Amino acid sequence: MNSITPDTRLDIAQLIYQTHMSKVHHLWLHSSDSQACVALIAEGISEDNLLLVTRQGKLVGVALFETQDFPHALNFTFRFFTRHFGVFSSFRKWLAFICYKRVEIKLTPETFHIEALVVSPDFQGQGIGSQMVRDASQLAGELGKTQLVVELPEHYQKMLAFYHQLGFVTKSKEKVKWPILSRFARRADASSYYVLEKDLLKDDPVCRNAVPSS
């Protein structure tokens, strides 16, 4: 859906890394090397799973999404890891990433899953986050989806309020139960998380004006 240059890939990766550093280190890539993580994300993101917002040519917002038709926002395959790490280390990292993806939302024909939504710190509070949710809603409708879904760690209270403003409802509070993953989730401060849903068949007037709390 997007044709992006290598420089834009790096901009996307840096913005995601800055916002989700613990998640990247402990749940996605299992590496604390910041340069390697940014390079890996830049290489692994799928162009078919991106929504981007720019201001005066500058990237200011990124959303990663997944559906049954486009299920891999992050294409971190075993071969992908082996290009950057040893075989044994790659297998461990790849297995941990697969376990993480297995405990995420199970995609259905109706589901549009927002894997990540990030806004540049210099542009927060300007409605960019709500614009991306609107864009996600529009794209989901075009793809025949009727439900937006997002997961938030329990301590993301400001983002929880933001999504509630946009018409999402908290469907459940979950805990990471897999022993192989729970240790990494604790390190990322994500062992408890909320599952939020938004019914796209309902009218959504608040989506036009809501902005994240500062």
Image (tube, grey):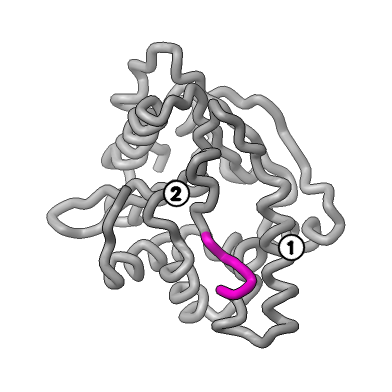
Whether the magenta-drawn stretch holds residue 214 is answered as: no
Name the kind of residue labelled 2 in the image.
Leu
- At x 75%, y 38%, the residue is 174
13 vs 75, nearest the viewer: 75
Q: Which residue is mark 1?
A: 184
- Left or right: where 194 falls relative to 34: right
Mark in front: 1 vs 2: 2
Quick one: which residue is furthest to the top in this view?
A: 202
Q: Which residues are magenta?
A: 75-80
* Image quarter in which the C terminus is found: top left
> At which x and y percent is residue 107?
61, 36
Name the kind of residue labelled 1 in the image.
Phe
Quadrant of the image occupied by residue 129: top left
> At which x and y percent is residue 17?
47, 65
Give how far apart the Cα atoms at labels 1 and 2 are: 22 Å
**Label 2: element kind:** strand
Q: Which residue is mark 2?
A: 64
The image shows residue 148, relative to residue 175, as above or below, that is above
Quick one: which residue is furthest to the bottom in this view?
A: 86
